[in-house]
Image (cartoon, rainbow, N blue to C red):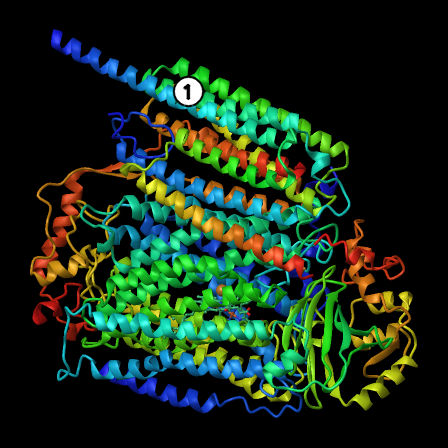
């Protein structure tokens, strides 16, 4: 009886532990997102960056933040169980890049030549 | 397997039949086309077709020969042939299967890349190109501005101060540099004997550079469906001697002018004959015009680039087009500050 | 029953039964989201090709109110975060009211986002920055509007989830649905990152 | 309320049915006639259903079912119904062009344009797509040893959405007419400035709504294949057809979004005055071409890949041999799928972009010839050293080999921009794509029908009738379309209502003759069906394996029970069933029977179909109240529905046992027939395998 009790409690404890870890993880994600967002806005609003750098900076910050979101909120990681999801995501990104960059390349060329 | 014998016979009969019917294009047309080019660009395109066919045949012919042979040889009723039901892999065969098509595609790719760069329709025909492709240039370039209307082509010669509908005339030996647009929906300008086709779109300018090496006629047609008169949007494109060309320019200069009102009428949907009627001209055949405003082409392009809406009444291809209401912008300014 | 069962994106919820079924459903939904991602990506690309097509009408400087965008960003991030908390309380506490509370936070935040966005739309309308004015504005309204529509759809979904939690409690089926909802919600947040940086910030940079 | 409030912009003048009475001519007779045929045909079906008391049967057994097999059959039936229209249009078009010398043809040019537009749209979206979707529906679960799709209800909804698209196109026949810009519907020609309407709106809504259905089908197939394979069947033990189906599904998932985006932007332009593709205010029609072909190109591989799958299965089966180069085929299929996303520009080499872009896309296109070539060679190698039976499917296969290779060859030619500039938008293109679509896709489908019809209905199709039809088909195809290459090279544009070059005339006549042979071939289908149904007793193959098949679906009775397999099979190799037969122990029976749960019928699909048809119709005719009601109804339905548990029906173990043991019993009573008696009443579907003799 007692042993069972203990077991239950231990399991609960480990669950608490786990919950705390997970919360911490979410918080880190939130803070990172806020920082990255603020950085994006700052890069435009403060005028500290040279004009030519702003766009690349924005792209890098946005991509970083997307990775943070994928990792923290969507739980994508490199572990085995997630491999299928990760592969699907990467495959989608591959196709989407072909289509999106292809479009930009083609349309830029066309508008330059017309 | 009686059934299968019948099948064989029928297939054989079909092959003979198909071969008999499908004799190569030996048409009795008089005009130049893809198969009978007028100039070096189209000539190169035909050469491409020939060589592409030849190298691709290396991979294709084995199918034509192999399939009937295999089907016959390994038919079920022939129990003298080998039978290898479990055979399913062979490294050497794999190498051939992947390797041969891959090699062909590499060759094909190199080939097409060279061609695409060499005869890029935007590339002006100059001495360098003439040398590389082994043809001769004989005289200064001619500029032709092509405007696609519903259902006719308007050819503007800004430097000569003339315009023509229903006929394109170019001098032999001189590079022709075309700028193309439309004043209606999207079209595609094709002159097979000269260089194939390029799209023409409202508010935009595409280019095509050609040269005719010999006298002759080809068809300048639209290949992009644009409504009920589509089939009639075909005009002869004549390559003539320099002297004939000058003579043609002179007669055109004497023709009535293509001023804004005339253009507004001309742009209405209808074929060449309808335009002739609308403009109150008599006779038949192509229409020639003197060109008061050498900027006309730019202003047509600029119609769609002013930043103001162009309602259907002001768009020549539209059903509600009203020649009285539609005015071209005064300058071709819009053409350069592109918003495309 | 915790980490090993966490075999799909979204929130990890401890499942007991219907493991395979839930996994199939979440995977299916993930595939749907990927297809939707392509849709958004293409609208972005079209926006990119039309960024210069203002036709003399209002341009990015005119329509961008960075304060409003910042507020919208904060609200959406808040909503996403609230949703995470809802799923955590579902996973670890299995308490329906707690979960519902956090869902309400997420929903309110998202609703506020939509209201602020609608105010932007109204302002654009008043300055003549309507989609009928230019290609650029067409693309702008389509892209931002598409995202807004997705958020609005998400709110309807949340309403349904709330009703179901009230009616059935936190059953496995409902947990699986909340998981999928979470996927959707966080995905919309990611799309918004693209919008605020590429459409608005880059527009005025 | 005003009439315009209730009926939007719909008026009596839009009723095509009456055109012939208003202004009698050959032209209106053809258009009104077609409309009447459709309306009367539909009415006849309704009357028959009522008189024969079949409504309940239709509703319970078909419209509300979620059984993937029945859904598959409904897709194929839809394909045939639409095909009747598509073929009729094809034949009218050939007749028209044969009389088009100097424009003396018998239809108005407007009507001609509507013909090629509906023909292309119907054939691609409502014939070819339903065919392949139907096959994948029927076969995937059976081949991977599953009971049903991953999402059976979604599957039914996809069918409903496809039905919506087809319904809208059919309605346009009687009300208002379709657009005239081809299946590609390029703006600005189809924009509000040049065609206010309703034609392009019909196009937009039928394509967008059925597009959602296709996307969901793709999702469903992909998840089914990913997650529902029988234990032991790893990816490299899947039948090739499943591989092609998987790749097609991936294409469906990722290639439909560009079409949806293009369609919806077009709708925004048309309905709300946006400027995506207009001439003025910064609109850019080139974006449309770009988006459309980002879908359009993968689309053609969506169509052809399942056909490749069918050809792979049939070569192995009818050569009584293991498939050569399975891994090569898999690799080739996957690379075709991926590369197909990177070649779309070859449909507009002539738009004016830089030579580097043209070269890049030209090369990418040519690369597809490599995996396709591998496939063709693999099939040849499979036949090599086989024991080939010249059955109807093999006749189709023969036609495919030769004719498809010609079509692929012309594709490669087109991939060279320098050549493409000369033949783009000409009849050469028409020849090319019919040359790949008919001998590729359609031959594949018909071969597949001959193979799997006995699975679905329990009796074989008549061999001789089938073979004759197939030959008519091959001859008719060659005569109809090969001449078009020639006139294309000579510069005859596609979609052209007239020509003035007498040199084209002989080609046009040959082509017309061919079209009539094709029409005869289509009738041949019905003759085949009729003969087969009349002789169904002698053709019966209830035991399920008429062709000495190799994959799991042949290890079930014909037709298979609703639950497919009494227990989910355990798989240990490729061609699992063939292996069992070769080892002399097929039909392994379960040690124990269990209750089987199947999803219950639902009306979700019909609700979706009715409401989206109303929505599309309302948006086409600006009937705003109906649009709002339909959209709201749809959302409300799913909102409410989500509150209810989805019911299942349970098949008791004893029933499963009864059905299964009756079948086993029958198997034992019947002597296995060898391949010499394949086309013989003795063939009841219990095969003595050739493989055993050989290995
Ligand atoms: C099922 C449909 C299908 C299939 C399978 C294909 C297959 C191919 N198609 Fe086709 N295509 C269409 C349907 C299809 N097409 C349609 C509908 C259009 C027109 C749409 C419209 O405008 O309305 C079109 C148009 C089209 C164009 C644009 C033409 C234009 O408008 O200017 C091009 C250009 O590159 C092209 C190329 C190809 C190529 C390279 C293949 C390749 O996949 C072919 C590969 C096959 C082979 C090559 C044969 C087998 C190979 C061997 C035996 C050995 C190896 C060979 C070599 C090494 C060369 N197609
Ligand atoms: C799958 C697609 C498909 C199919 C099957 C067909 C079939 C046919 N098509 Fe085409 N067609 C297109 C797709 C297709 N088409 C497309 C996409 C376009 C472009 C539209 C545009 O311009 O936008 C087009 C355009 C097009 C044109 C316009 C050309 C132009 O632009 O100038 C023409 C002209 O005649 C034509 C003719 C035909 C004919 C005569 C048939 C014939 O009807 C052939 C069909 C005959 C049969 C299918 C009967 C065979 C049936 C059997 C043998 C059954 C036997 C089976 C068993 C017993 C099981 N088609
Ligand atoms: Cu078309 Cu620029
Ligand atoms: Cu293509």
Mark 1 element type: helix
Q: Quadrant of residue B284?
A: bottom right
- What residue do we see at 30% from left, 34% from top? C7
Rendered-image quadrant of the N terminus of chain C? top left
In the rendered image, the vertical position of residue D673 relative to residue B25, given as above or below:
above
Along the line of sight, the residue nearer the viewer: A35 or B52:
A35
Point out residue A41 in the picture as x, y percentages from the top left corner: 60, 29
The answer, for residue D537, to whether it is visible in the render is yes
Q: Quadrant of residue D93?
A: bottom right
Label 1 marks a residue whose chain is C
Q: Which quarter of the figure is the C terminus of chain C placed in?
A: top right
* Left or right: B25 as drawn, with respect to A74: right
| In this picture, residue C24 sits left or right of residue D198 | left
What residue is shown with label 1? Answer: C86
Q: Position of residue D427 (x, y in %)?
A: 56, 76
> Residue sitting at 17 percent across and 42 percent down?
D655
C114 relative to B217, above or below: above
Look at the numbered disc 1 and say if its residue's Cβ is closer than 8 Å to ligand 4.
Answer: no
């Amino acid at each position: 009886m007692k042993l069972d009790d203990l077991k239950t409690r231990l399991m609960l404890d480990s669950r608490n532990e786990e919950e705390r870890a997970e919360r911490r993880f979410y918080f880190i994600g939130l803070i990172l997102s806020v920082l990255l967002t603020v950085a994006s806005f700052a890069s435009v609003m403060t005028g500290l960056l040279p004009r030519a750098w702003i766009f690349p900076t924005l792209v890098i910050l946005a991509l970083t933040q997307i990775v943070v979101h994928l990792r923290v909120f969507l739980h994508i990681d490199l572990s085995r169980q997630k491999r299928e999801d990760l592969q699907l995501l990467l495959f989608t990104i591959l196709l989407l890049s072909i289509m999106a960059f292809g479009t930009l390349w083609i349309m830029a060329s066309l508008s330059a030549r017309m | 397997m009686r059934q299968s014998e019948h099948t064989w016979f029928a297939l054989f009969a079909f092959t003979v039949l198909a071969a008999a019917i499908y004799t190569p294009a030996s048409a009795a047309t008089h005009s130049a086309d893809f198969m009978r080019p007028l100039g070096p660009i189209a000539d190169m395109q035909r050469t491409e077709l020939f060589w592409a066919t030849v190298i691709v045949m290396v991979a294709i012919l084995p199918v034509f020969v192999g399939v009937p042979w295999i089907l016959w040889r390994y038919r079920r009723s022939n129990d003298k042939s080998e039978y290898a039901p479990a055979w399913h892999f062979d490294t050497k065969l794999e190498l051939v299967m992947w390797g041969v098509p891959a090699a062909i595609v590499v060759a094909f790719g190199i080939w097409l890349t060279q061609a695409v760069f060499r005869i890029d329709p935007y590339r002006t025909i100059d001495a360098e190109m003439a040398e590389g492709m082994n043809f001769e240039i004989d005289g200064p370039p001619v500029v032709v501005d092509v405007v696609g209307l519903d259902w006719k082509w308007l050819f503007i010669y800004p430097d000569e101060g003339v315009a023509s509908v229903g006929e394109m005339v170019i001098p032999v030996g001189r590079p022709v540099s075309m700028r193309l647009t439309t004043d209606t929906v999207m079209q595609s300008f094709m002159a097979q004997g000269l260089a194939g086709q390029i799209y023409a779109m409202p508010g935009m300018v595409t280019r095509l550079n050609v040269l005719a090496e010999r006298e002759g006629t080809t068809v300048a047609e639209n290949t992009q469906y644009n409504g009920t008169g589509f089939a009639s949007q075909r005009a002869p494109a004549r390559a003539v001697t320099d002297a004939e060309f000058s003579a043609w320019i002179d007669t055109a200069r004497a023709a009535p002018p293509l001023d804004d009102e005339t253009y507004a009428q001309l742009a209405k949907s209808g074929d060449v004959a309808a335009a002739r009627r609308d403009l109150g001209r008599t006779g038949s055949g192509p229409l020639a015009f003197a060109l008061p405003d050498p900027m006309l082409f730019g202003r047509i392009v600029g119609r769609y680039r002013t930043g103001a809406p162009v309602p259907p009444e002001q768009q020549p291809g539209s059903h509600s087009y009203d020649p009285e209401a539609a005015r071209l912008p005064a300058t071709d300014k819009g053409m350069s500050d592109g918003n495309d | 029953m915790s980490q090993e069962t966490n075999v799909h994106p979204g929130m990890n919820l401890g499942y007991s039964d219907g493991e395979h079924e839930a996994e199939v459903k979440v995977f299916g939904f993930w595939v749907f989201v990927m297809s939707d991602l392509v849709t958004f990506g293409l609208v972005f690309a079209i926006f990119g090709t039309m960024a210069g097509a203002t036709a003399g009408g209002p341009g990015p400087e005119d329509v961008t109110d960075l304060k409003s965008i910042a507020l919208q960003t904060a609200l959406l991030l808040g909503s996403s975060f609230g949703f995470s908390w809802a799923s955590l309380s579902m996973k670890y506490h299995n308490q329906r009211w707690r979960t519902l509370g956090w869902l309400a936070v997420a929903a309110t935040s998202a609703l506020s986002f939509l209201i602020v966005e609608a105010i932007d739309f109204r302002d654009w309308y008043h300055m003549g920055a309507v989609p009928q004015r230019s290609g650029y504005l067409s693309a702008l309204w389509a892209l931002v509007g598409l995202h807004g529509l997705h958020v609005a759809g998400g709110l309807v979904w949340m309403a349904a989830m709330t009703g179901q939690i009230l009616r059935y409690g936190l059953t496995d089926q409902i947990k699986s649905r909340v998981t999928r909802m979470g996927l959707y919600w966080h995905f919309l947040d990611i799309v918004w990152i693209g919008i605020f940086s590429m459409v608005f910030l880059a527009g005025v940079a | 309320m005003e009439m315009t409030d209730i009926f939007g912009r719909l008026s009596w003048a839009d009723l095509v049915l009456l055109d012939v009475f208003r202004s009698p001519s050959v032209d209106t007779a053809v258009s009104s006639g077609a409309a009447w045929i459709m309306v009367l045909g539909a009415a006849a079906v309704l009357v028959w259903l009522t008189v024969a008391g079949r409504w309940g049967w239709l509703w319970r057994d078909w419209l509300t079912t979620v059984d993937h097999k029945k859904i598959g059959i409904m897709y194929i039936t839809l394909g045939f119904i639409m095909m009747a229209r598509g073929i009729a249009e094809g034949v009218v078009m050939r007749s028209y062009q044969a009389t088009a010398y100097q424009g003396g043809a018998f239809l108005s040019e407007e009507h001609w344009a509507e013909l090629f537009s509906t023909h292309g749209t119907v054939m691609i979206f409502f014939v070819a797509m339903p065919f392949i979707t139907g096959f994948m529906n029927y076969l995937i679960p059976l081949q991977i040893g599953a009971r049903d799709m991953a999402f059976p209800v979604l599957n039914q909804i996809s069918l409903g959405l496809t039905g919506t698209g087809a319904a809208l196109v059919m309605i346009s026949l009687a009300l208002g007419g379709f657009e005239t810009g081809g299946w590609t519907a390029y703006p600005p020609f189809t924009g509000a400035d040049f065609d206010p309407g309703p034609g392009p709106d019909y196009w937009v809504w039928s394509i967008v709504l059925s597009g959602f259905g296709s996307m969901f089908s793709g999702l469903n197939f992909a998840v089914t294949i990913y997650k529902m394979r029988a234990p032991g069947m790893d990816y490299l033990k899947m039948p090739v057809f499943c591989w092609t189906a998987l790749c097609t599904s991936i294409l469906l998932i990722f290639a439909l979004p560009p079409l949806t985006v293009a369609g919806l932007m077009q709708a925004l332009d048309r309905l709300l005055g946006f400027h995506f593709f207009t001439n003025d205010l910064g609109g850019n029609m080139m974006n449309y071409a770009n988006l459309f072909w980002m879908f359009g190109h993968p689309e053609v591989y969506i169509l052809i890949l399942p056909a490749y799958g069918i050809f792979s299965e049939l070569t192995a089966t009818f050569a009584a041999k293991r498939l050569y180069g399975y891994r090569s085929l898999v690799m080739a299929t996957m690379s075709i799928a991926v590369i197909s996303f990177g070649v779309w520009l070859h449909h507009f080499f002539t738009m004016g972009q830089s030579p580097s872009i043209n070269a890049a896309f030209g090369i990418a296109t040519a690369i597809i010839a490599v995996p396709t070539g591998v496939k063709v060679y693999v099939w040849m190698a499979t036949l090599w050293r086989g024991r080939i039976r010249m059955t109807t499917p093999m006749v189709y296969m023969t036609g495919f080999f030769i004719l498809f290779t010609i079509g692929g060859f012309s594709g490669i030619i087109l991939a060279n921009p320098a050549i493409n500039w000369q033949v783009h938008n000409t009849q050469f293109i028409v020849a090319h794509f019919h040359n790949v679509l008919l001998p590729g896709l359609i031959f594949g489908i018909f071969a597949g029908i001959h193979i799997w019809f006995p699975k679905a209905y329990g009796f074989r199709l008549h061999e001789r009738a089938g073979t004759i039809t197939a030959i008519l088909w091959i001859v008719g195809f060659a005569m109809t379309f090969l001449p078009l290459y020639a006139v294309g090279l000579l510069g005859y544009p596609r979609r052209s209502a007239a020509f003035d070059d007498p040199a084209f005339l002989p080609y046009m006549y040959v082509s017309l003759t061919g079209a009539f042979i094709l029409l005869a071939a289509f009738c041949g289908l019905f003759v085949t069906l009729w003969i087969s149904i009349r002789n169904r007793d002698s053709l019966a193959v209830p035991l399920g394996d008429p062709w000495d098949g190799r994959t799991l679906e042949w290890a079930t009775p014909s037709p298979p029970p609703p639950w497919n397999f009494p227990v989910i099979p355990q798989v240990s190799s490729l061609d699992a069933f063939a292996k069992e037969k070769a080892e002399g122990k097929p039909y392994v029976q379960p040690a124990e029977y269990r209750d089987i749960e199947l999803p219950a019928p639902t009306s979700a699909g019909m609700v979706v179909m009715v409401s989206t048809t109303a929505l599309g119709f309302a948006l086409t005719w600006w009937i705003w109240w109906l649009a709002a009601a339909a959209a709201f109804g749809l959302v409300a339905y799913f909102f409410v529905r989500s509150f209810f548990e989805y019911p299942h029906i349970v098949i008791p173990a004893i029933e499963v046992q009864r059905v299964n043991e009756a079948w086993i019993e029958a198997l034992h009573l019947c002597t296995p027939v060898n391949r010499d008696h394949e086309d013989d009443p003795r063939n009841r579907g219990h095969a003595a395998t050739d493989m055993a003799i050989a290995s």
